[in-house]
Image: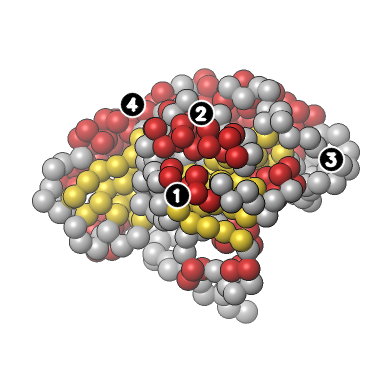
Amino acid sequence: MNLFDVYSLYDVVPVKGQGCRIWDDKGQEYLDLYGGHAVISVGHSHPAYVGAISGQLANIGFYSNSVKNPLQEQLAEKLGKACGYEDYSLFLDNSGAESNENALKLASFHTGKDRIVAFRKSFHGRTSGAVAVTDNPNIQAPFNKNHKVTFCDLNDSAAVEAELKKGDVAGVIIEGIQGCGGINVPDDSFMKELESLCKKYGAVLILDEVQSGYGRTGKFFAHQWNGIKPGIITMGKGIANGFPCGGILISPEFEAKKGMLGTTFGGNYLAMAGALAVLDIIEKENLIQNAYEVGEYLKANIPALPQIKEVRGRGLMLGMEFNCPVADIRKKLLFEDHIFTGVSGTNMIRLLAPLCLKKEQADVFINALNNI
Ligand code: PLP
């Protein structure tokens, strides 16, 4: 049987990881500034994380959501404290797309309405609703295009208000910082207006923090830079450092009804053990502050090369927009300098390093950039 051939792959086989370093099957070491696409939050194979998951597996690996799972309650308590949303509730699922799917559904249940406002250049995942609110018709099948979605330009609050006024909008979904669409940081004033417009017209503000959350930008969630409080916050990626896990934080205004949301694997023991270890490590190693400091250090020291038009982002969510396609530059960085990077579109190198990146490691990248 062949694999369904949907991914463009680099010819590298990682077999071992530690912190921000990876080794391939030939023993070559790499610096990881991509974090498996913002997933590796506390570093590869952190001993406390490995111990937590393997210790849990030795006791019990899985049971269903039909019995009590105290690890879920522990996570809710710890996460509430860590992110400052202690009065919100937590629903656990398995991925970023599923989190967005649940958020959209909940907004629709809550308001009784069925249209969603989303933004140009957004990416929210590949499941039915999540892909429908993603601004990329090429990844939507005809089936997905049946959802009622209206796209507005980022930072255009007049356009959003014109849609909300029509009275049929259940929710507005926005990324804390747009990731796949090119590291676009929404204006502070726009985020505040969005919050008050959603309140005024009774729509749910959904903050997709799948990529920008969990400490990446130097605050627990990127929207906390804007001082706003959404109705629903969606999470994924770094929540369990690579063990599949997602979740949504739900404001106290929402009423839970039995059977309203559900999933087989969401909140399972191994994901919970991983997620609890992640929060412990983030706290003990002060990784949110580290992400901010090292990210800002990187941003300030990226050389002013003629090919680089702009550097955008916050903390360890950074994009370097070039005035040319970056495919060859990324190949050189990977195969000659042994540095993993990410990409947005054709002209942007995107950095989503583990939150434990050190300044010396940032310097390795800066030196390599000087030689592209
Ligand atoms: N939302 C954002 C902002 C993302 O960047 C992604 C993935 O890149 C998703 C949602 C989808 O997450 P997943 O691939 O875990 O379904």
- Are the residues tagged 2 and 1 within 8 Å (C-beta)? no
- Are the residues tagged 1 and 3 within 8 Å (C-beta)? no
Label 4 beta carbon within 8 A of ligand 1 = no
Circle on res. 293: 4
Q: In front of the other: label 4 or label 1? A: 1
- Are the residues tagged 4 and 1 within 8 Å (C-beta)? no
Q: Amino acid at mark 4?
A: Glu
Label 2 beta carbon within 8 A of ligand 1 = no
Q: Which residue is mark 1?
A: 159
Which residue corresponds to the image point at 48% horizontal and 71% vertical from the top-left?
138
Q: Amino acid at mark 3?
A: Lys
Q: CA distance from mark 2 to mark 1?
A: 20 Å
Q: CA distance from mark 3 to mark 2?
A: 27 Å
Which residue corresponds to the image point at 39% horizontal and 44% vertical from the top-left?
155
Seen in the picture, residue 279 relative to 149 is either above or below; the reply is above
**Element class at badge 3:** loop
Q: Amino acid at mark 1?
A: Ala
Label 1 beta carbon within 8 A of ligand 1 = no
User: Is the residue marked by circle 4 packed among few (<14), some (14-19), or many (20+) residues within 10 Å?
Assistant: many
Q: Give the mark nearest the N terminus, 3 or 4.
A: 3
Q: Which residue is mark 3?
A: 257
Q: In front of the other: label 1 or label 3? A: 1
Q: In front of the other: label 3 or label 4? A: 3
Nearer to me, 267 or 96 = 96
Q: CA distance from mark 4 to mark 1?
A: 36 Å
Q: In front of the other: label 2 or label 4? A: 2
Find the residue positioned furthest to the left. Answer: 306
Residue 20 visible: no
Seen in the picture, residue 92 relative to 24 is either above or below; the reply is above
User: Is the residue marked by circle 2 packed among few (<14), some (14-19), or many (20+) residues within 10 Å?
Assistant: some
Q: CA distance from mark 1 to mark 3?
A: 34 Å
Q: CA distance from mark 2 to mark 4?
A: 23 Å
